[in-house]
Image: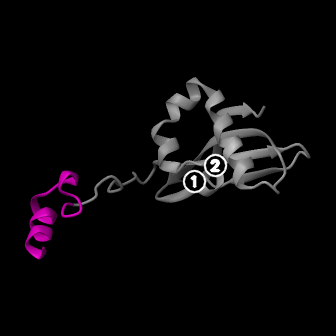
Amino acid sequence: MLVALGYGTVAGDDDLFPFGPMVQYAFSIPPDGEIKSLFMEAETAAGARFEVPIEPSYVGIRRAELEGQLTRYINNPALLQEMAEAYARLHPKAPRLTKLHVITKVITLRDRRPAWTRNVVRVSWSVR
C-alpha cells in the first residue's frame, strides 16, 4: 500500500485516488484575484432572511452538487422548489420559506488581503 501511495503521489493523478493526489482543490489565487464561495439565503413569511446551509440535512443537496449544476438552476429556477420542500420536510417546526436565493460571495484581494466583498445573486425562487 505504501508503494502504491508513493507512486501515486509522485506520478499519479486523480484517476488513481485514493493513491493519487486530489488536485481538485490544488490551485492558487493570484495576489490580486478573487475568492468565490456559493451560499444560500432564505426568506420567511415574517420577512426574516437567513443563511441556509447547503447540506442534505437542510435542503437535501450538498453544496458541491449545487455548484456543479448551478447553470441548470439558473436556467430553471423552479428546481429550487425541491430544496424548499426538503427544508420544510426536514424542519417541520421552522418558519415557512417564501423565497430562496443562491448567492456567490466574491472577495476581491489586493496584495493577498481582502479589499472588499460583494454578493452576487445567481438565482432566486419564490416558494409555492
Q: Give the total of numbered labels.
A: 2
Which residue corresponds to the image point at 39% horizontal and 51% vertical from the top-left? 30
Which residue corresponds to the image point at 86% horizontal and 49% vertical from the top-left? 48
* Residue 36 shows in this picture: no
Residue 10: x and y in percent read: 11, 64
Which label sits on residue 125?
A: none
- Depth check: 35 or 42 in front? 42
Question: In what element is the residue under mark 2?
Answer: helix
Residue 74 image-quadrant placement: top right
Question: In what element is the residue under mark 1?
Answer: helix
Residue 101: x and y in percent read: 69, 39
Report the amino acid beneath label 1. Answer: Pro
Which residue appears farthest toward the top when viewing the image?
Answer: 75
Report the amino acid beneath label 2. Answer: Val
Which residue appears farthest toward the bottom when viewing the image?
Answer: 2
| Residue interval drawn in magenta | 1-20
Which label sits on residue 56?
A: 1
Residue 125: x and y in percent read: 71, 32
Determine which residue is flagged by label 2. Answer: 59
- Depth check: 115 or 35 in front? 35
Q: Distance between the residues labelled 1 and 2?
A: 5 Å
* Residue 87 shows in this picture: yes
Magenta region includes residue 19:
yes
Pointer 2: residues within 10 angstroms few (<14), some, or many (20+)? many
Tell me whether the residue at label 1 lies in contact with that at label 2, contact meaning CB atoms closer than 8 angstroms: yes
- Depth check: 86 or 108 in front? 86
